[in-house]
Amino acid sequence: MSAPQTGPERVAARPRSDRPAARVPARSRLGDPHPRQEGPSDLRMVAPALAAWAAAAWALDAPTAWVIGVVGACLVTAGGLWAARRPVARGADLMRTARLVRGPWSAVSVAAVLLCVASSAACAGLQGADLRRGPVPALVRQYAEVTAELEVSSDPRLTRSRISGDHAMPPAVLIDARVSRVTQADGTTTATRAPVRVIVDTHTRVASAKSPGDAAKGPGRSPWLSLLPSTRLRVTARLVPPVSGGDPVAAVLRVRGGAPPDVVGGPSGTQRWAGRLRSGLREATEGLGPDARALLPGLVVGDTSRVTPELDDAFKKTDLAHLLAVSGGNFTILLALFIGPIGLAQRVERRGFAARLGISLRGTALLCGALTLGFVVVCRPDPSVLRAAACGAIALLALATGRRRSLIPALATAVLLLVLYDPWLARGYGFLFSVLATGALLTVAPRWSAALRRRRVPPRAAEALAAAAAAQALCAPVVAMLSARVSLVAVPCNLLAELAVAPATVLGFAALAAAPVAMPLAEGLARCAGWPAGWIAGIARTGASLPGSGVDWPDTWAGALLLAAVTLVVVLVGRRLTRHPLLICACAVGLLLVVVQPPPLTRVITGWPPPGWRFAMCDVGQGDATVLAVGGGTAVVVDAGPDPVLVDRCLTALGVARIPLLVLTHFHADHVAGLPGVLRGRSVGAIETTGFEEPVEQAVFVRAQAAARHIPLTRAVAGEHRRTGTLDWRVLWPPADPAPSPDGPNDASVALSVRSAGLSLLLLGDLEPAAQQALARSPEGAGLGPVDVLKVAHHGSAYQDPDLIRRVAPRIALISCGKDNPYGHPAPRTVAALRGEGALVLRTDEDGAIAVVGAGEGLSVARD
């Protein structure tokens, strides 16, 4: 007779039936391909992650005493709750403790949240103190000039070229770095560790190339753009405050002059290796088209140096900007190659290369871990990259240990760890976008996908549509706060672009890996990747060019909450509409009409453009862009304005598809910087310009744009006469050999006398009084008399020749100027002089776009 079993032996012999076994032996050494889901999603990590996120965002610039107080209170309270959950001998106390431990908000759960808050606040407080510690803050207040030794912590990047009045401000190089030593003007040297941002004013002529990145490749390339992270420099610069108080930098170092950087220590071997890979990919994509050449490095490794402002705007307007930076989607595609599709995240993955090669699960995890580390180094630790890498590392840890993989806890844990690692992520919009989009894909998208499948939508289409709609619904309020705009084409553009993301990413990474060892192979792979990359860029450009691609929205917290409420209403109404296919079709057609805005329908609803318009002045802000109708979608365009988007939108609304001649009166930026918008999607026969090629950088920009599209350039000379259809015009100015030479580009403006079926117009460009008087005395100006329409010179500035105004006595005077411009255009005395001659004065800053209709007694104007 056997001895009775002890308590522990009985427990070991009779496991409780209500608790599932931790692991089930696999039937294969590669694992069971279809294990069962173990209960509902685990949300225990969500509350600690959100609490840590909020605590970090608050503590970064909170007073030190407040941070210490909050950390201490959280630790004391958590310790008390933890002590209260210890089991005691008496049965009643044991039951009370069990009640404390159980439930979603048990004592242990609250203690865990408080500990996370304390840790996050402490980390954020310490990092925030770095900005206020040391000599840098005091030197910033003095705008002191110092010599600093620093270590580069980011890839150099070019800012956009800004239009300021009639000049294009040159771009600057931006570099994030950490200062290690500061030497003041009196020779005092102090060690520190303050994060800073370096702004280097360069003279790189980015306007002369297809993109800023291309412009900086040749002999004029700034050596600052070649710096790699971890490089140590010595710079002499002026310390100025950061632009925004929320920036994670203690100061901005402005480096003047075009001197090359003083390198005191080269980059690390890891960064040199990553730099070779990135430069190899850029070299492999040299032979691609402009859009594919710009987009593919950004899609693969986050290198956006070649992305033009126009392409960047297109991606932002269609909510495809996440494709210009490396995101979790890229990393997911890479992991899927090794461990199988993401749809098998609740299974032991058996469809990747690793399984086909017979690699064990732990070996697969180690291989993918090395891939994760390389991914972060090559693609740089941006917020989305860090979030994707952290989630992937947690999933790989679960894979290596044979435990269940749950994506929501992995996301929450990744957020918690990253906020502790870099608290500044808590205030970053990029990190917020990444987490919101991923959360939407893990929580909302599966439910919407299941609902669509129940309504007989094919599974693949249901998953894609649900993912795009869910990400848009959750991210739209934040996007509206940043851009003051809501995209109406985001979901269809994302759906169409998604078809090409996977092949472009896979082929792009293959080209990246092949470039150091076999450049011809890398170039072939890049050419294959260029097709889907070009498709994505085409989707972005097409979506952004649609007249109703988006609507303006308040960029405030109230606007974000309003958009969230509108989104909720749309979702609730949409659930009911899914039961009525005809209503869905009607809504889809209505949205399509709103987005496309076909000209016949738009003309009926808004009256713009008016039927039979002869001349139109576009509203392009502080600049000039005018259109002379020829008929049948054809027009002669005079000047392009300062903004490609605005002039493109105006020409699209006017229905202009063919431009036999584009006249650029002179090379000031407010007349030529919008040239890419005029050329976008339109056939242009020739570009005619003045012979006075200043400013030089803008003249080079125009020549480069024309050469890229094989458009001939001609020079306008006084006495030239042309005719197309019912449109007839003569060049009045400048003369072939001006004497004296023009006093600046304004006096070299092309002036035109135009007739269109009985309508007479005079376009004076930006001529100043001296040139206006010379024009009136010239042989070509001898026949000037009263005109129907005058395009007032130089945006209606005070510098006008009153004799010329009296001589032409316009019936309508049109002034193109920007709202609240800093130049005071138009001048009150100019407006008064025009009205004194009986002219009707209209201006784009108050009246918007203006169109002239009819002639003679039937002359009239319409406003947009």
Image (cartoon, rainbow, N blue to C red):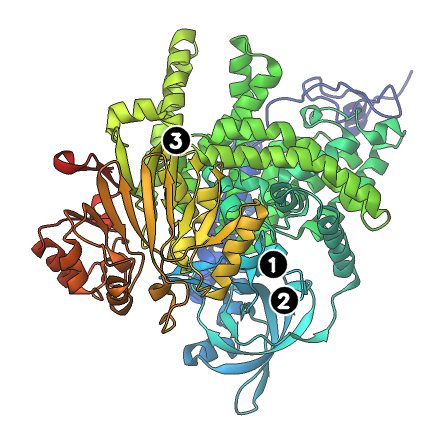
State the CA–CA distance, disc 3 to disc 2. 41 Å
Which quadrant of the rendered structure holds the C terminus? top left
The kind of residue on which mark 3 rests is: Gly
The kind of residue on which mark 1 rests is: Ala
Q: Is residue 752 left or right of residue 111?
A: left
Q: Is residue 29 left or right of residue 110?
A: right
Looking at the image, which is closer to me, 603 or 176?
603
Q: Residue 769 at x, y = what percent?
A: 24, 67
Do we see residue 303 in this rendering?
A: yes
Which quadrant of the rendered structure holds the N terminus? top right
Residue position for label 1:
215
Circle 1 — which element? helix
Do the numbered discs 1 and 2 sit on residues whose CB atoms are within 8 Å? Answer: yes
In the rendered structure, find residue 633 and report the number of the disc placed on it: 3
The kind of residue on which mark 2 rests is: Gly
Q: Earlier in the sequence, mark 3 or mark 2?
A: 2
Residue position for label 2:
220
Q: Residue at x 39, y 41 (%)?
A: 480
